[in-house]
Image (cartoon, grey):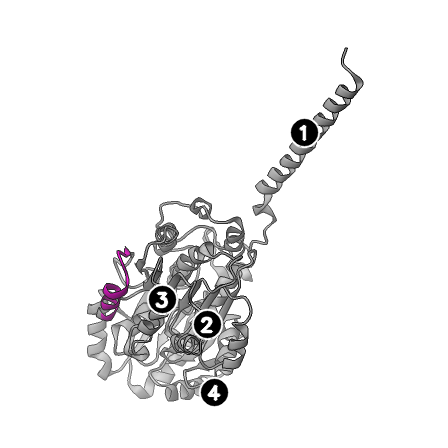
């Protein structure tokens, strides 16, 4: 006959096992329901071009990312990886150096920021990754993306650029910083002052690498790299164009890089390009006509000098249209405010210099106008890439004078693209977003 003590002991063990099973079931329920509890923004139902939909069908969950990173990805509204993300994320996670060419507006920032954040150890109170970009606006935009992706982790992201208070940045480095997004001059200054300690920084990202390696930055990147650890170092180069200086830099610093090239053609599939022959004195009148006829969601208008930017913005305002302007000679605080307010949709039109051509992502922009036609194919490519972001639709309209005619032909040839004469009426389906059910976006908003 079983003793009372043995029976009580068995009952206690059964209760304990039952409690453990119940706890595990609750944990599994929580695990399976984590995605349902996220604050995911509404699904983007606008039709997208093959620039971002031509994937192998992978999901973000397949990359073995930490759940906290996945939570940040989905709460940003990123549903599936784009082709560049699909190609770059798994290779970056293996620790290989990467040389990646992909079009503007196809998800390059996500392609490097997701695996960079995945590799950071929040328990190690050291700088572990450095992301360098050419402009202050792009640095702010990139840092915001990284902060949003990392919001469910303990990873601390910092941005530091020229034109801001150096003392504030120095004080910030006395706190925990894991990832730094910076412009070249400022981070080099902080390294030389022995404020930014890079002994544990294993990952270096160069976004818009062609610009960073141009004469504008005069070899700053060689000095930055010399201050990073040599052992187990990973360098990720991203750009839409790769001129000779990028190849020379790659041969010098990148050991056995994995090359990704998604640039069979240079221009975005969703951007239709037109030109209009005008005399210089007719340009403002022509612009006024475009404003009255086009269904502009938001537009960016490019000029070739800071003086012309301000003059044109004044003219547009006098015509009765809301207009901001931004250029490199403005105070940084003013630039930041204009950039923020335009991205927030407070104004429909922005006049700018080429400061605004690099990586700046304003999804609502569906019209780009080259009030002054650029001389370089590379500049043209980056300008028109401000519309048609992430596989959406947009148009680029170029106002061409007699002096511009040879540059127009040469840029067409160099980019292997077609810039058509502007028709009397432009089909709205070329640049007004269509939703997947066939309705136009502005129809649904009414």
Q: How far apart are marks 3 and 4 (CA)?
A: 41 Å
Residue furthest to the top in view is: 1
Q: Mark 3 points at which residue?
A: 206
Question: Contact, CB < 8 Å: mark 1 with mark 4?
Answer: no
Residue that mark 2 sits on: 196
Stretch of the chain drawn in magenta: 245-260
Q: Earlier in the sequence, mark 2 or mark 3?
A: 2
> Residue 21 is drawn in which quadrant?
top right
Q: Nearer the viewer, residue 412 or 98?
A: 98
Q: In which quarter of the image is residue 219?
A: bottom left
Question: Image point 40% across, 85% down: which residue?
Answer: 309
Q: The C terminus lies in which quarter of the figure? A: bottom right
Measure how far apart labels 1 and 2 are at the Cα level.
52 Å
Q: Earlier in the sequence, mark 1 or mark 4?
A: 1
The first of marks 1 and 3 along the sequence is 1
Q: Circle 4 is placed at which residue position? A: 318
């Amino acid at each position: 006959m079983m003793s009372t003590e043995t029976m009580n002991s068995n009952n206690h063990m059964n209760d304990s096992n039952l409690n453990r099973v119940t706890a595990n079931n609750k944990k599994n329920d929580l695990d399976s329901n984590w995605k349902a509890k996220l604050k995911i923004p509404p699904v983007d139902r606008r039709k997208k071009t093959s620039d971002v939909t031509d994937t192998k069908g992978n999901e973000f969950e397949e990359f073995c990312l930490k759940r906290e990173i996945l939570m940040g990805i989905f709460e940003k509204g990123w549903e599936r990886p784009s082709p560049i993300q699909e190609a770059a994320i798994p290779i970056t996670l293996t620790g290989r150096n990467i040389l990646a060419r992909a079009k503007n507006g196809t998800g390059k920032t996500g392609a490097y920021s997701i695996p960079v954040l995945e590799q950071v150890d929040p328990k190690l109170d050291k700088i572990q990754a450095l992301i360098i970009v050419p402009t202050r606006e792009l640095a702010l935009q990139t840092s915001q993306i990284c902060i949003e992706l990392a919001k469910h982790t303990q990873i601390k992201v910092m941005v530091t650029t020229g034109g801001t208070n150096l003392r504030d940045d120095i004080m910030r480095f006395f706190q925990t910083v894991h990832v730094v997004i910076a412009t070249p001059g400022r981070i080099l200054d902080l390294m030389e002052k022995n404020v930014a300690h890079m002994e544990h920084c294993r990952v270096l990202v160069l976004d818009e690498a062609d610009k960073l390696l141009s004469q504008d930055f005069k070899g700053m990147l060689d000095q930055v790299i010399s201050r990073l650890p040599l052992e187990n170092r990973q360098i990720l180069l991203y750009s839409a164009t790769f001129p000779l200086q990028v190849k020379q830099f790659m041969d010098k610093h990148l050991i056995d890089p994995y090359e990704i090239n998604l640039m069979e053609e240079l221009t975005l599939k969703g951007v239709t390009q037109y030109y209009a022959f005008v005399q210089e004195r007719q340009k403002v009148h022509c612009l006024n006509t475009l404003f009255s006829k086009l269904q502009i969601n938001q537009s960016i208008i490019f000029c070739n000098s800071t003086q012309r930017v301000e003059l044109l913005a004044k003219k547009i305002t006098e015509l009765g249209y809301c207009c901001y302007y931004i250029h490199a000679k403005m105070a940084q605080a003013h630039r930041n405010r204009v950039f923020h307010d335009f991205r927030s949709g407070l104004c429909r039109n922005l006049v700018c210099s080429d400061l605004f051509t690099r990586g700046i992502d304003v999804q609502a922009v569906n019209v780009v106008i080259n009030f002054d036609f650029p001389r370089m194919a590379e500049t043209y490519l980056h300008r028109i890439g401000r519309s048609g972001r992430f596989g959406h639709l947009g148009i680029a309209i170029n106002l061409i004078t007699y002096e511009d005619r040879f540059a127009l032909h040469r840029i067409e040839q160099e980019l292997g693209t077609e810039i058509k004469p502007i028709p009397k009426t432009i089909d709205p389906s070329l640049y007004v977003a269509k939703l997947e059910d066939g309705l136009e976006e502005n129809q649904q908003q009414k």
